[in-house]
Amino acid sequence: MNGRPDGRVHAVYPGSFDPPTNGHLDVVARASAVFPIVTVAVVVNPQKRDPYFSLEERETMLRACVEPFGNVRVANFRGLLADFVKRIDADVIVKGLRVVSDFESEMAFAHMNRALSSVDTMFLMSDSAYSFVSSSLIKEVFLQGGDVAKYVPQVVLEFMEAKRLAHTGRK
Ligand code: PNS
């Protein structure tokens, strides 16, 4: 499948991760069990000009979360995912699917990324327990005082609490 002497398949799992959720971590765990090398790639996204967490914070949270997996690393990229995948010589893009409607847009992305880089996208279904969990919903609920502890890793919850305290003075 690839030109590496050991033939080890390298997968890239891209996203905004603003913040990482248990749904993301579920996909990381599944990818880590299937692919010998996984890079979780945080996008520097010009469309989302105002991320809640800085790129550095998102990478720090993710590094803490993926530490138990010996074959997962964290990186970031600007610009096209297809260019990043080619630059690091990865073999496959991994995306998580929560619900059928996710596939609508993901299919177009997968075709475009393959046209641009010849790299295929493989989809992993996150656990149904996370089918309604998204970073934006988590942020909305948390900022209105709701309990999101079940939906994010402990380290992420601590980052969220610290940020809310810094922004609002509220614990
Ligand atoms: O977590 P998100 O925000 O759903 O992740 C979206 C992401 C980062 C996978 C997507 O926006 C992306 O690939 N951005 C890089 C720019 C790019 O390559 N755009 C064309 C996609 S075919």
Image (cartoon, rainbow, N blue to C red):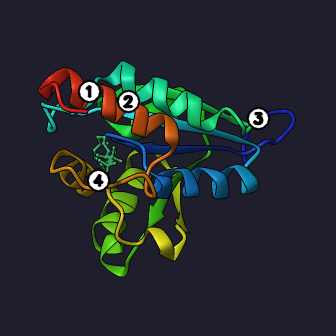
Residue 155 located left or right of residue 165: right
Disc 3 and disc 1: Cα gap in Å?
29 Å
Where is residue 171? Give x, y as percent.
26, 33
Q: What is the spatial separation of the Cα atoms under label 3 and label 4, in whole angstroms?
A: 28 Å
- What kind of element bears circle 1? helix
Circles 3 and 1 in contact, beta carbons < 8 Å: no
Residue at which label 1 appears? 163
Q: Residues within 10 Å of mark 4 (few under 14, many from 20)?
A: many
Question: Which of the marked residues, 2 or 3, is nearer the chain's N terminus?
Answer: 3
71 relative position to 76: left or right = right
Residue 138 is marked as 4
Q: Taking 66 as reference, is 99 above or below it?
A: below
As shown in the figure, which amino acid type bears the numbered disc 4? Ile
Select label 3 or label 1 by which is in front.
1
Q: Nearer the viewer, residue 21 or 97?
A: 21
Q: Residue at left 38%, top 30%?
A: 159
N-terminal-most mark, 4 or 1: 4
Q: Please give the residue where the numbered disc 3 appears in the rendered image.
A: 70
Q: Amino acid at mark 3?
A: Gly
Q: Please name the residue that numbered disc 2 is placed on.
A: 159
Rendering coords of residue 105 (x, y %): 28, 66
The front one of 82 and 30 is 30
**Quick check: is the Cβ at mark 2 less than 8 Å away from ligand 1?**
no
